[in-house]
Every structure is written in C-alpha cells, then in structure tokens.
Amino acid sequence: MNTQIVFTLKDLLMSLLWIALIVFVVFLIVLLIEFIRTVKLARTMIAARKEEIDHIIQVAPGIVDSVDKITGIAAKGVDGAYQGAMSIVNKFKK
C-alpha cells in the first residue's frame, strides 16, 4: 500500500504565509509587552524624582535668561573686537 501526500505550490505558499503571520503576531505581542514595561519604568522614575523635576522646571527660565544676557554681552564684545581689527586692517591698506 503506497500512500502519497501531495502539496501544491499554493498550499506551500499559504502555509509559509500563515507561519509568517504567526511569527509577526508573536513579535508584535513581545514588542507591546516591552513597551508597556518601559512606560511603567518611566512612570516610576518620574514619580520618584518629581520634586527634582519640578525644581528644574522652576529654575530653567532664570538660567535661560542669564544665558541670553551673557550671549548678548559676548556678541557685543566680539563685534567690538571685529570692528577694532578691521580698523587696524583698513589703516594698513591706506
């Protein structure tokens, strides 16, 4: 008694498609689980450092204002140095 099992190309491709779909769904489930773990970890870290974060948020505008003032002063100094150097260069050109 000879038994033959015949697979058509369509059957083979459909089987491969189903296997790929199952692997993709498992991958999405693992990815979703890791994303949920990451969000939980971020929430706990933020909750643990809430006071420090609030302090930084309150202090940051003052720091930005100071940086703006310092860069304005530095820009004026650089512009003055440039103008002085150009005046010396212009004197040598004449």
Image (spheres, rainbow, N blue to C red):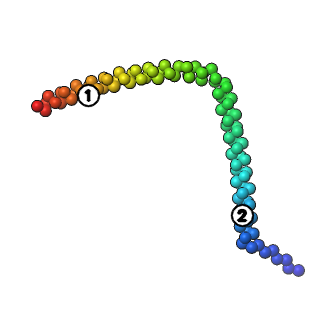
Asked which secondary structure carries label 2, the reply is: helix
Counting every numbered tag in the picture gives: 2
- Mark 2–mark 1 Cα distance, whole angstroms, equals 71 Å
Residue tagged by mark 2?
16
Identity of the residue drawn at 33% across and 25% down: 75
User: Given the image, on which type of amino acid does mark 2 rest?
Assistant: Leu
Which of the labelled discs sits on residue 66, or is there none? none
- Judged from this view, the residue extending furthest toward the left is 94
Q: Residues within 10 Å of mark 1 (few under 14, many from 20)?
A: few
User: Earlier along the polypeptide chain: callout 2 or callout 1?
Assistant: 2
Tag 2: Cα neighbours inside 10 Å, few (<14), some, or many (≥20)? Answer: few
Residue tagged 1: 82
Location of residue 12 by image quarter = bottom right
- Residue occupying the far bottom of the picture: 1
**Of the residues shown, which amino acid type is indicated by label 1?**
Tyr
Q: Residue at x 74, y 64 (%)?
A: 15
Give the percent coordinates (x, y) of residue 26. Answer: 73, 51
Residue nearest the observer in this picture, 69 or 6: 69
Q: Residue furthest right?
A: 1
Is 90 on the left or on the right of 22, as rendered? left
Q: Position of residue 78 (x, y in %)?
A: 30, 26
In terms of secondary structure, where does tag 1 sit? helix
Residue 83 vs residue 59: left or right?
Answer: left
Q: Quadrant of the C terminus?
A: top left
Dot 2 and dot 1 residues touching (CB under 8 Å): no
Q: Position of residue 62 (x, y in %)?
A: 49, 19
Q: Where is residue 59? Give x, y as percent.
A: 53, 19
Please identify the quadrant where the N terminus is shown. bottom right
For the point 81% across and 74% down, which residue is it? 5
Left or right position of 59 against 44: left
